[in-house]
Image: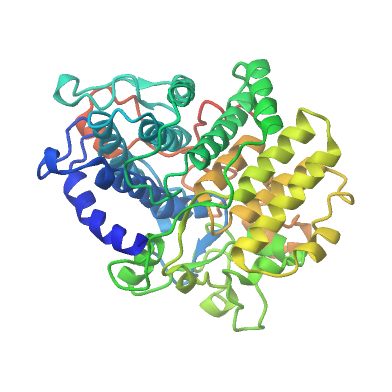
Amino acid sequence: MKKILYSAFAGLLTLSSCSLDINDDPNYPSSDNITPSLQFPAAINSVADAVGSQLFIYGGFFSQYFEQMPEANQYNDIAELNLDESKDLFTRPYRYLYAGALQDLKDITTKTNNPADLFAVAVIRAQAFQLLVDNTSETPYTEALQGSANPNPVYDDGKVVFEGILKELDDAEAALDGSVMEMSDPLFDKSVSQWKGYANALRLRIYMKLIDGGVNVADYTAKAKALVAAGEFFTGDVKWDVYSPVEGQFNPFYGTKFELNANNFCAAYPIAAYMNETADPRIGYAMVRRTSDNTYAGQLPGAKQGNIYDAASHKNNTVSAINVEMTKDAPIYLFTQSEVQFLIAEVEYRFNNNAAAAKSAYEAAVQADFASRGVAGASDFLAAAGSWDSASDKLHLLYMQKWVAFFMRNHMEAWSEIRRNDVPALSPYSAAQINSAPESYTPGDLIAPDVNYYGKGNIAMRVPYSSASRSYNKNTPSAKQVSDKVFWDVK
């Protein structure tokens, strides 16, 4: 059913999201004939496309899951942080979130008064704005989506946006009156309780960023504790599962590989080193053993041919390719059960001082990730390298295992968590030093790209504004660099 539905609204999305100007109404063929049951799946698809394509790719590099194959050049700019607005890194997600998802969601609110439908709209709207803030910090919000009435919306501070969408969620949930959803719902099959659980998970994700950003810490800590105490979260994973192993219906990440007719992705050194060090059975889920010695190994970040490696050893068989083939019809994960449980564990440990409850949620998080990948051995792993009881720094273990669980699931959120927690830590050693003396390296530490346009020692902290915004909106702020931080990253 979902596969059929996807084909139906994919064409609609193409028609409705053709403008790069977030203030232009999409070019609908006929607004009266496009019902919320068509627009709502299209809006979710727009968010999923952002999460599962461009954000997945550069989030994978920034989280140091990906490097490009040693003999490839497709992703040099991302790998080497050679990024400014002219590179158009954020233009596609910007377009899909504003001209696609948010415009469709706004239009739905003019066509229905059903409280359950409007609540689901508020949830997807919240996730879209969360993604925008986590990428660029400031983004149009209070004046956005007004069309020709305001072609130059101001960019609001990320704090204003986060607090605004939290209020929208609260107001929409307060308006629920027991009615059932009327529009199509490919995510939860019209389960309002599941939508409430999804909203609570988004709230908790945002609360933690506000807390660690120093915003109303006592208030948001209390709210985070209350959410965890209530325990009303979604079951399973929130995943956009509409893809098929057929050309034109591929998962968008696989589609990138298909269009290039080449797999330019290999494992990055940090993720391969950490999973090897911890004997993690999940290592083979997306990595391919290198042919040189049948082991798993990653590429040092920002390493170019002739720069670190000598030409004789710099070949594709010296690193582990990412198994892109397994993503052909894979779903896009908007929120995993594993992430929910990690968030619960963090609240229990940091704010409730309840180590037993934290351990239970931590182990549930790891088990959920193993299960979602169909990988056996979770119990043995939790008794060995993943053991909560054996960890001298339990919070560090939690964050490291959360980083592993985001691999090939949600790379955008992985990058956000790295910035929020500073885990994995940035190695004090350069890529060249690690190449010369690998024993000095702590497995899992991030490594500043060897070729780095922002200077040695820098990693990505945000992305530049969309060039589409610069072209259309005179209120786009002055340009930012990838080394500038988003508002909640204060560490």
Extreme residue toward the front, this view: 178
Label count reads 0
Residue 444 seen in the current view:
no
Write the residue at 67% across / 45% down. 341
Q: Could you tell me residue 282's position as x and y percent? A: 66, 66
Q: How is the image coloured?
A: rainbow
- The answer to whether residue 373 is above or below residue 294 is above
| Residue 482 appears left or right of 270 | left
- The answer to whether residue 55 is above or below residue 84 is below
Quadrant for residue 419, please give it: top right
Write the residue at 12% across / 38% down. 32
Quadrant for residue 274, please give it: bottom right
Write the residue at 64% across / 57% down. 369
| Residue 366 appears left or right of 308 | right
- The answer to whether residue 255 is above or below residue 292 is above
Q: In this view of the protein, which residue sits in the foreground, 310 or 393?
A: 393
Q: In this view of the protein, which residue sits in the foreground, 458 or 421?
A: 421
Q: In which quarter of the image is the C terminus?
A: top right
Q: In which quarter of the image is the N terminus?
A: bottom left
Residue 122 seen in the current view:
yes
| Residue 123 appears left or right of 93 | right
Q: Could you tell me residue 197's position as x and y percent? A: 55, 38
Extreme residue toward the left, this view: 30
Q: In this view of the protein, which residue sits in the foreground, 191 or 201?
A: 191
Q: Could you tell me residue 459's position as x and y percent? A: 55, 44
Q: Could you tell me residue 457's position as x and y percent? A: 60, 44
